[in-house]
Image (tube, rainbow, N blue to C red):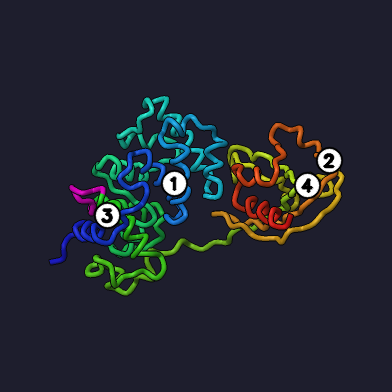
C-alpha cells in the first residue's frame, strides 16, 4: 500500500528539503516578508535582498517607520515594485490597527495590502502552525502533475479544482513541514523543465509520471502576442551629475526614480530639448536593448546628452540631480541601473 501523499512529502522534507533558508523558523514578520519577495521570484535571487532588508527593517515597527523611498531603495532590482509599496502600507496598517503585532487570524491577514489567499494561508501555516492549504506556483505544478489535471492553472475553473485537491490532501498534523515540503518539491524536484522524477517520492501514483505526461502538465498558458513598445531614455549629464525624475505612484516602476522617457509616437527629442532650454555639448547613443515585462516588451534606446547647464526641469519637485554613485544607490529600476552602470564604466 502506498503511504499517503502528505506522509511521503513530510518524510522527504525531513531528509532532503531545504532547512537553511534565512526566514525559516522565524516569526510571522520574516515569513510574510519572504512570501512577498518570493512571489514570481526565485529563492536564489531573494536571499540577498531578504538579508539586506531585515538588517535595515528588523521588524514591523521599523518597516512602518521607514519612508516609502527607503523601502523602494532596498527593493530596487527585485522587480514587481507594487509588492514593496504594499509591504510598506501593510506594515503601517499593522502598527495602526494591531499595535505593531502581526495578526494571527487568516481573515485579518488577508485584509492587508498585497496578500492573497495563498500567501495568507502560508503565513498561517508556517508562522502559526495553523491548518491551512496553500496554492502558489510550485504547488499548482506539483498538484497538476500528481492529480493529472489538464488546463491552464491560471484559469478560474482549473484553479478551483487545484484548491479542492490542496484542501483534500492537507494533513491534520505537521502542517508547517508539509507546506514547506510542497514548496521545496516544486522548486527542487518537480520543476517546470527537466523535473527529477527519479528522485520523487510521489512517482508511484503520480498521474503525469505514470501516463508519461510530465512534460505536458501543467498545461502551458495559452500563447498570445506580447505587445512591443519603443522608448528613448535620456541620460542628461552635467559633469558627473545625472538627472532623475520620480515616476507616478502607480503603474510601471511606480514611485521609483527614473530617467526622462520619450515614448515612441510622443514628444520628439528635439522638442524636449527646446522646451527645456537645453544646450547640448555632446550627444552619444548607448547600445539599445529590450526589457521584458509581464505584459509587454519595451525596446529602449538610451541617449546620453552632456548639457552646458542644468535644464529648467530641475526646478520641478519630481526631479533631482545626483552624482552617478548616488543615483546607483537610489530606488531605481533594473534597466536604469544597467544604463547608469554603463555610464560609470566609460567615464
Q: Which residues are magenta?
A: 168-176
Residue matched to label 2:
309
Q: Earlier in the sequence, mark 1 or mark 4?
A: 1
What is the CA distance from the residue labelled 2 to the residue labelled 4?
Answer: 22 Å
Residue matched to label 4:
267
What is the CA distance from the residue labelled 2 to the residue labelled 1?
Answer: 41 Å
Frontmost residue, 29 versus 292: 29
Residue 148 pos. (x, y %): 30, 65
Frontmost residue, 272 versus 180: 180
Residue matched to label 3:
165
Residue 172 painted magenta: yes
Q: Does 307 sit left or right of 299 as displayed?
A: right
Q: Secondary structure at mark 1?
A: helix
Which of the labelled discs sits on residue 180, or is there none?
Answer: none
Residue 336 painted magenta: no
Quarter of the view holding residue 185? bottom left
Q: Earlier in the sequence, mark 3 or mark 1?
A: 1
Q: Is residue 161 visible?
A: no
Amino acid at each position: 500500500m502506498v503511504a499517503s501523499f502528505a506522509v511521503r512529502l513530510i518524510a522527504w522534507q525531513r531528509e532532503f528539503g531545504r532547512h537553511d533558508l534565512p526566514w525559516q523558523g522565524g516569526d510571522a514578520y520574516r515569513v510574510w516578508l519572504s512570501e512577498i519577495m518570493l512571489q514570481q521570484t526565485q529563492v536564489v535571487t531573494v536571499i540577498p535582498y531578504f538579508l539586506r532588508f531585515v538588517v535595515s527593517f528588523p521588524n514591523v515597527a521599523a518597516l512602518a517607520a521607514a519612508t516609502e523611498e527607503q523601502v523602494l531603495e532596498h527593493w530596487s532590482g527585485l522587480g514587481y515594485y507594487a509588492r514593496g509599496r504594499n509591504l510598506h502600507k501593510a506594515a503601517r496598517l499593522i502598527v495602526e490597527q494591531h499595535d505593531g503585532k502581526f495578526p494571527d487570524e487568516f481573515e485579518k491577514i488577508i485584509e492587508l495590502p498585497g496578500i492573497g489567499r495563498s500567501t495568507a494561508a502560508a503565513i498561517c501555516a508556517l508562522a502559526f502552525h495553523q491548518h491551512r492549504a496553500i496554492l502558489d506556483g510550485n504547488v499548482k505544478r506539483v498538484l497538476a502533475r500528481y492529480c493529472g489535471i489538464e488546463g491552464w492553472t491560471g484559469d478560474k475553473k482549473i484553479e478551483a479544482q487545484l484548491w479542492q485537491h490542496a484542501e483534500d490532501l492537507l494533513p491534520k498534523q505537521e502542517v508547517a513541514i508539509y507546506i514547506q515540503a510542497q514548496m521545496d518539491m516544486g522548486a527542487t524536484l518537480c520543476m517546470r523543465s527537466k523535473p527529477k522524477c527519479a528522485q520523487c517520492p510521489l512517482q508511484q501514483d503520480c498521474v503525469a509520471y505514470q501516463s508519461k505526461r510530465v512534460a505536458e502538465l501543467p498545461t502551458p498558458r495559452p500563447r498570445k502576442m506580447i505587445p512591443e513598445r519603443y522608448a528613448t531614455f535620456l541620460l542628461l549629464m552635467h559633469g558627473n551629475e545625472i538627472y532623475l525624475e520620480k515616476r507616478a505612484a502607480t503603474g510601471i516602476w511606480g514611485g521609483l526614480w527614473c530617467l526622462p522617457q520619450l515614448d515612441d509616437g510622443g514628444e520628439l527629442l528635439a522638442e524636449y530639448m527646446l522646451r527645456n532650454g537645453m544646450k547640448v555639448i555632446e550627444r552619444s547613443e548607448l547600445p539599445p536593448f529590450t526589457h521584458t515585462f509581464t505584459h509587454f516588451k519595451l525596446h529602449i534606446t538610451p541617449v546620453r546628452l552632456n548639457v552646458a547647464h542644468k535644464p529648467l526641469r530641475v526646478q520641478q519637485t519630481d526631479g533631482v540631480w545626483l552624482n552617478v554613485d548616488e543615483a546607483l544607490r537610489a530606488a531605481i529600476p533594473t534597466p536604469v541601473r544597467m544604463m547608469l552602470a554603463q555610464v560609470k564604466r566609460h567615464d
